[in-house]
Amino acid sequence: MREAFRQLESEGWVTIEPNRGTAVSLQSADEAREIHEIRASLESLAIGIAIAHHTPETLANAQRLLEAAENEPDPALYVVRNEQFHMSLYAPADRPRLMELIGQMHRRGERYLRLKLGLPIHKDSSDAEHRAIFEALAARDIEKAQTLVARHLLATGELLYRFLADAQALAQASHVRKKRRPRASASSRATPTASSQADR
């Protein structure tokens, strides 16, 4: 059980506090953006190394995974398809430690990515960006592939940052309004006096 909680903590799902227990982690706009900034750096490096080592077979596999993602209607499963496609782009680089780091960032960012991919308009744009990345890969255009991967991930990070920051701001404003809501005064809550009753 402890090992399971450590795994969940490493992926950002829970926070473990000594002597206090385990709590579900709150979503953070800053973390969402930073995860995708790190991914942009790691994955643009990985695709640049991998391009020269792709074969017709690995390209066919990447295309198959791309099409599986495009045809996946379930947002939860699409997150899985999304990771499979991305990792297929970098696998021929044969950099196990780099792939491990990328995998960690994918798992860390999964709960944020679900926010974006739960909306059809964002899935459509993600699919189009994936296809453009694949086409650059197939054309062996290193600079274009690296640029498209970085742009894709940085844009996702900024989108999630704005979404979460706006949601946090709305929640804070609602909390402030509730705190400022005037309570009924003691005099207004008091029972009618004898004279007021007599006036009725």
Image: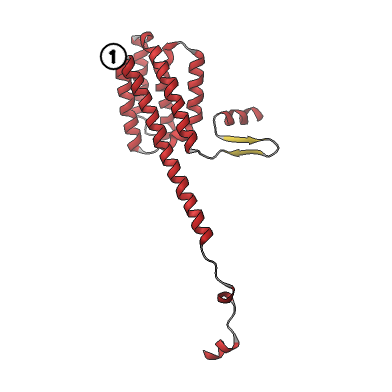
Residue 3: quadrant of the picture: top right
Residue 160: quadrant of the picture: top left
Residue 170 location in percent, x, y?
Answer: 45, 50
Residue at the limit of the structure toward the bottom, as seen here: 198
In this rendering, would 109 be left or right of 149?
right
Q: Is residue 48 above or below residue 151?
A: above
Q: Is residue 106 above or below residue 185?
A: above
In this rendering, would 172 be left or right of 23?
left
Residue at the limit of the structure toward the right, as seen here: 19
In this rendering, would 134 be left or right of 17?
left
Residue 75 location in percent, x, y?
Answer: 41, 34
Residue 22 location in percent, x, y?
Answer: 63, 37
Residue closer to the observer: 134 or 154: 154
- Type of the residue with mark 1: Ala
Q: Residue at x 49, y 34 (%)?
A: 31
Q: Residue at x 47, y 45 (%)?
A: 168
Give the residue pinned by disc 1.
139
Residue 186 location in percent, x, y?
Answer: 59, 73
- For the N terminus, the image quarter is top right
**Label 1 packing within 10 angstroms: few (<14), some (14-19), many (20+):** few
| Tag 1 secondary structure | loop
Q: Residue at x 40, y 38 (%)?
A: 118
